[in-house]
Image: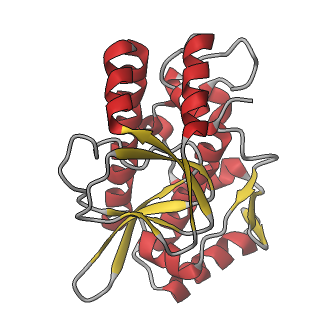
Amino acid sequence: MHNPWTMKMEQFARFSPEQRQTLDALMTERRRQNEPGDDIIREGDHSPDCHVVLSGLACRYKVLPDGRRQIMAFLIPGDLCDAEIFILKEMDHSVGALTLTKTALIAGSRMKELLRETSCMAEALWWGTLTDLGVLRERIVDHGRRNAYERMAHLIYEMLVRYRVIGAAKDDAFEFPITQSDLGDATGMTPVHANRMLQKLRKEGLISLKGKVLTVLDPKRLKQVAGFNANYLHLDRAHDRQDGMDQRAGDLI
């Protein structure tokens, strides 16, 4: 089975078997494990490596001088944490592990080689970066125009779609080890208010939450509540694969 990074990248470009093999090999050469609460890379740091999430859950965040944290995005398996780090002198935000998280490390020099040698790799990385920016724009809309209920519904439906892309949402269920504090920092709510919105979604039969697994019981209704439009995820570029591993974009959203 292909690694989650390959699966995500192939939503944007088609790779040859040899290119897939190269990507798979990169995911096994060097790995790092971070405990919950660890920073994978800190704001102000420079790393010669790029980090790809292999398992677990991480987030992009910034901390204000008074200690308040804003989470800009959750990072799931297959997400590239810091594509820009081998160009920038330092990170302008932090990436932290929310659970036990494993990442693959790709040397910046190797990434540059891939971009020069493989046009489809460069194309996939560009589309991946545009998707990251699209997620950030949705968070701006969240805080500016969506009410708390819509905001929570949108975040959960987005997570469902992203987990489907990497084949990690079986029967519309996926791991959801996100604390109330994390949800509050991601949605701009207090932890108590974030929990109220989760409970409202549960009472209305849209989701169930057992332990650390969230199941979307009624995807169609949840999508309507969220006013979800998946265009910012650019899944219309998804390709059928001969090995049958991924689905058409229409099946994903």
Q: Position of residue 211 (x, y in %)?
A: 78, 73
Q: Position of residue 197 (x, y in %)?
A: 58, 76
For residue 246, side relative to residue 99 (left or right): right
Residue 177 against residue 157 in the figure, above or below: below
Q: Which quadrant holds residue 65?
A: bottom left
Q: Which quadrant is the N terminus positioned in?
A: top right
Residue 168 against residue 109 in the figure, above or below: below
Residue 145 against residue 233 in the figure, above or below: below
Q: Residue furthest left?
A: 89
Residue pictured at 60% horizontal, 82% vertical: 196
Q: Position of residue 126 (x, y in %)?
A: 34, 29
**Res. 236 visible in picture:** yes
For residue 114, side relative to residue 253 (left or right): left
Residue pictured at 55% horizontal, 27% vertical: 23
Q: Position of residue 39 (x, y in %)?
A: 43, 68
Count of all numbered marks drawn on residues in the image: 0
Residue pictured at 61% horizontal, 44% vertical: 161
